[in-house]
Image (cartoon, coloured by chain):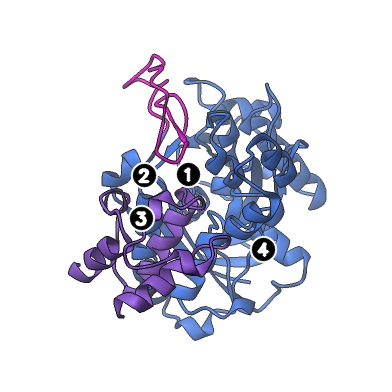
Chain colours: A purple, B blue
């Protein structure tokens, strides 16, 4: 999965945030819709798409969508 | 010797906690959002002074009445709960008297969560095969609502209180197949009420709020959502495979999957991961919530009532729960 595809897939876990708000460098924790449930959705998405596990700490340590992508790819 | 479920029923408290009520108290929630993200529309919660044993006595009385069961035949009572009436004595002893069950009976409490029904049923089967008992009354009752912090907007949407009663004996509606049960105590801290027992008897009064505004307190139920989600998704394929192998059946032979459903979000993830067609996966917690050890017996009864489950079907049931503990079995209806 390319980073652009990852950004698109990441954005699909949000219901209210318009897709144009998502980019490689988006600080996702600053989005109004970000919360514990969207965090769980992202963890589930990574499991489903990559069969890899990211933890709550991984999410806490990531700032941008690119950080998270790099982390997933490194696992 | 073959062991069967003879009858199942359940009992829920009267108070209904709707999504409208939760959304009213938490402006960041909307009814639509709870519906979409959690999938539960309402759950039942006990009132003050109403306990898991009260609900379980209610379920047992209903079981005796509905199926015209003579209570004097019960010779073994298992009460699965993490909300006992007292530290001691054993709540099952109090239930024996309240239900007017024979005194020549073993009465034990089993402290297990979401895996409580599967583990309890495995114990019931074992004592019957060992010749210790002929008619086991298995009660599962839970009231997690009492452990939740009133600002815990996540867990409030998930958990519901409830109880189920199952009679296990040597004939009945479903033969109890083989079990797989497992334990991994490294997960203990990820779903825990830390204080109030022997390790930490006094309240810690350490309430703090996390980055998402969720309360964390040693005096209330704490769930590490990401850790529980990862554990559930990672372990379920192997559990299912182990249960199928032990029962010598293949996935395609399972007519209905009746699993512990933590919430509909997680249930749907697990269903997709296991590639179970929607019509073979029974999902029923929309109006009852996650009743912990009673989700599977409530689902079995609801599936029987609505005609989804009938004689001749093979049912696979799997539960993963706090501890961690997990279990699975095949039931032959």
Q: Which mark is residue A27?
A: 3
Q: Chain of mark 2?
A: B
Residue B279 image position (x, y, % from top left): 64, 78
Front-most of A49 and B269? Answer: A49
Q: Chain of mark 1?
A: B
CB of mark 4 within 8 Å of CB of mark 1? Answer: no
| One can see residue B80 in this view | yes
Query: Which residue has dot 1 on it?
Result: B113
- Magenta span includes A17: no
- Magenta span includes B220: yes
CB of mark 1 within 8 Å of CB of mark 2? Answer: yes
At x 20% / y 67%, what residue is drawn?
A: A75
Query: Which residue has dot 2 on it?
Result: B323
Q: Nearer the viewer, mark 4 or mark 1?
A: 1
Do pointers 4 and 1 mark residues of a single chain?
yes
**Residues in magenta?**
B193-221
Front-most of B27 and B328? Answer: B27
Disc 4 crowd, CA 10 A, few/some/many (<14, 14-19, 20+): some
Q: Which mark is residue A48?
A: none
Query: Which residue has dot 4 on it?
Result: B172
Tell me the SS state at disc 1. Answer: loop
Q: Is residue B276 left or right of residue A2?
A: right
Do pointers 3 and 4 mark residues of a single chain?
no
Q: Could you give the CA–CA distance between mark 1 and mark 3, rounded to whole angstroms?
A: 38 Å
Residue B240 image position (x, y, % from top left): 41, 70
Q: Nearer the viewer, mark 3 or mark 2?
A: 3
């Amino acid at each position: 999965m390319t980073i652009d595809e990852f950004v698109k897939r990441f954005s699909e876990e949000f219901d209210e945030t318009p897709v144009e708000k998502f980019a490689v460098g988006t600080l996702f924790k600053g989005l109004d819709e970000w919360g514990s449930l969207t965090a769980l959705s992202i963890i589930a998405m990574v499991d489903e798409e990559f069969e890899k596990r990211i933890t709550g700490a991984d999410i806490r340590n990531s700032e941008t969508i690119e950080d998270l992508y790099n982390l997933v790819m490194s696992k | 010797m073959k062991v069967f479920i003879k009858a199942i029923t359940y009992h829920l408290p009267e108070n209904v906690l709707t999504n409208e009520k939760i959304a009213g108290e938490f402006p960041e929630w909307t009814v639509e959002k709870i519906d979409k993200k959690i999938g539960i529309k309402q759950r039942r919660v006990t009132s003050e002074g109403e306990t898991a044993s009260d609900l379980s006595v209610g379920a047992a009385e209903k079981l005796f009445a509905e199926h015209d069961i003579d209570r004097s035949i019960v010779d073994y009572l298992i009460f699965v709960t993490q909300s006992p009436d007292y530290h001691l004595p054993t709540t099952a002893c109090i239930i024996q008297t309240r239900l007017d069950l024979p005194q020549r009976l073993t009465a034990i409490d089993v402290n297990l969560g979401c895996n409580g029904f599967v583990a309890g049923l495995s114990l019931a089967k074992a004592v019957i095969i060992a010749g210790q008992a002929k008619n086991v009354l298995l009660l599962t009752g839970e009231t997690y609502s009492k452990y939740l912090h009133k600002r815990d907007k996540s867990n409030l949407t998930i958990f519901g209180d409830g109880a189920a009663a199952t009679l296990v004996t040597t004939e009945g509606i479903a033969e109890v197949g083989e079990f797989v049960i497992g334990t991994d105590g490294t997960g203990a801290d990820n779903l825990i009420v830390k204080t109030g027992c022997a390790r930490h008897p006094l309240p810690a009064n350490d309430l703090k709020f996390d980055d998402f505004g969720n309360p964390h307190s040693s005096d209330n139920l704490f769930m590490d959502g990401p850790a529980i989600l990862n554990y559930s998704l990672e372990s379920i394929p192997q559990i299912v495979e182990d249960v199928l192998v032990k029962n010598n059946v293949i996935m395609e032979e399972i007519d209905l999957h009746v699993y512990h459903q933590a919430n509909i979000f997680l249930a749907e993830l697990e269903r997709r991961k296991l590639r179970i067609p929607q019509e073979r996966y029974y999902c029923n917690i929309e109006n009852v919530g996650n009743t912990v050890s009673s989700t599977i017996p409530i689902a079995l009864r609801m599936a029987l009532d609505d005609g989804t489950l009938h004689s001749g079907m093979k049912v696979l049931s799997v539960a993963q729960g706090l501890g961690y503990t997990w279990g699975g079995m095949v039931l032959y209806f």
